[in-house]
Image (cartoon, grey):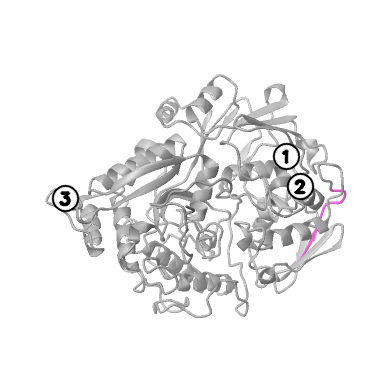
Amino acid sequence: MMRKKFLASVMIFVMALSLLSACGKQANDHASESPAEESSTDTGSDGTGETTASWPTTLTNSVHNSAAPDWTEYNQLIFNIKNTTDYNERETMMHRAEDILMSTGAIVPLYYYNDPYLMKSSIDGIYASIFGTKYFMYAKGCADNTLRVSLSSDPTYLDPALNSSVDGACLVANTFAGLYTYNPEGECIPALADETNPYEVSEDGLNYTFHLKKGLQWSDGSPLTASDFVYSWNRAVDPSLNADYGYMFSNFAGYDDGKVKAKAVDDTTLTFTLTSPCAYILDLMAFPIFFPVNQACVEASDPDGVNPGAWAESTGFVASGAFTLQSWTPGDRMVYVKNPYFYDADNVVIDQLVFILTSDEEAIYSGYQNGEIDFADSVPTDEISKLLSSNDPEFVIAPSLGTYYFAFNVNSHMFDGKSSAEAAAMRRAMGLLVDRSYIVKNIGQTGQVIATSFIPEGMLDGNGGVFKANDEKYSFPDEASTGYYAAEKTDASVTEAKALLEEAGFSFGSDGKLSPETPLAFEFLTNDSQSHVLVAEAIKRDFAEVGIEVTVVKEDWPTFLQDRKDGNYDVAREGWLADFNDPINMLEMFITESGNNDPQFGREPFEEEE
């Protein structure tokens, strides 16, 4: 088992809206880690031909350890998806990519997200996107003009280029601004971009000119200009920054060279060039890594370049959004105050935004009940049924687009001595043992839909339809459940799981459990929030039924995120809320070079320090 604690870093994200097509690189460009050759898997390996519903036939790895899947085809396929302008073929390739991903067994979906939270009925103006971002800046009806919010414990990064967690993105959305943002209806609308003439695009869809509002200012009163975007974007793609979301610039000309082809024509005119047309370019402009940061503030706080996020860790850092950080007491609260230089400050009514920092759901609920908290983004499992039965109007279940799952580290020592096919069989077997129905009904409780594949229910296919709807281009492996796992755990699924484990070299005793000669034991990593621990314990019980021994390891949020990112785990709880409404967002996160590739596909094993 892998165990070693670290600090810092974060995980998943934010954005919004419906998309229709690809956003990628031209065929003659090469991503820094995209292989030059196709995999030996011959069915649909280059995105041509008919997509297969069966598991891929090749699961060998000639690059890293023998148990990990060869990620050559997947990396190339994502590159091809982002290249093509044939949207029928693109849909086919995305289904193929999900087939490959699910065939590894390393991604085990549990349910599709919804977004439950508590909000005082006296408060108006707060809204959430289907991607998990909460917009608090237009709140009204708050006592003392102060909104008190509980999102989670202390954030790791407030830097919009380095944050990769949903709660962190909520903080970013209320303290920074981009060219575009989202309104309560989920529409992508101009923010720092001029409202009447926001942009022009060339006929071929490659060259953009954005026009900024005149007179924009940073929170210190200094001018915010187009050159701030050029600096910020080049900072975001600089390999030395190691930004988790840096790959979102991969369709920008110059990305491979670490410097995008963006130019400030004057203070209010920004131009840039893409390598292929991008239908969801406005959604990218509303995503945090595309937000500008203040160069002077960044460089003054980190002159040696050893701590790139330091500038946003101190109170009073220069920002562009509705609020600025006034004070931060770790483990207690963060106090933000209204930014008078915000472009839409006239519509911001509240004077303060206070974030209560704790992951203790019982304490959060108690604080909400006694009036110390106005908005609570989590609810104790034990209280959900009461809130539902009483039809409490303050208990909101908002729609969301994402998947809650757990992931195997493909380099875990539990797969030592196994072939890649045997390791995949082990993982798929354990996916079949999970009682998703129990988790949804007894832990989730808010009507979550059981997940039978990774791409969430209702996500569009980029070709005018819904990705999970069967059509002439594709039929899912299990038409009854339109997924890769049946919705309900059954005797048959347990029998199938045992057969897969036997394929992987395990044997069972007369009691139906693994024999002492072929034991299987590992750690399940989770953060210490109540609901996540309960899910981990439920999975532990499911695995114990066939003799698999699981130790649930609970870590504080920053340590958990870093260990998961580093591959310092065996199995970990995961969740991904889409950044925009297109399957490529759910698929490209698993390319080898992605900072969100927690399963470590195509990577060298993590080495523990002695």
Circle 2: residue type: Ser
Circle 1: residue type: Ser
Q: Are marks 1 and 3 in contact (CB under 8 Å)?
A: no
In this view, the residue farthest toward the front is 610
Circle 2 packing at 10 Å, graded few (<14), some (14-19), many (20+), is: some
Magenta stretch, residue numbers: 208-216
> CA separation, marks 2 and 3?
60 Å
Q: Which residue is mark 3?
A: 512
Q: Earlier in the sequence, mark 1 or mark 3?
A: 1
Q: Residue at x 55, y 50 (%)?
A: 12
Horizontal and vertical percent for residue 367? 55, 23
Horizontal and vertical percent for residue 560? 50, 45
> CA separation, marks 2 and 1?
9 Å
Circle 3: residue type: Gly
Q: Which residue is mark 2?
A: 301
State the residue in front, 474 or 266: 266
Q: Going by the image, does 192 lie left or right of 118?
A: right
Q: Which residue is mark 1?
A: 314
Q: Is residue 579 magenta?
A: no
State the residue in front, 69 or 212: 69
State the residue in front, 87 or 583: 583
Residue 127 in view, yes or no: yes
Q: Are marks 2 and 1 in contact (CB under 8 Å)?
A: yes
Q: Going by the image, does 566 lie left or right of 413?
A: right
Question: SS class of the residue under badge 3?
Answer: loop
Q: Quadrant of residue 422?
A: bottom left
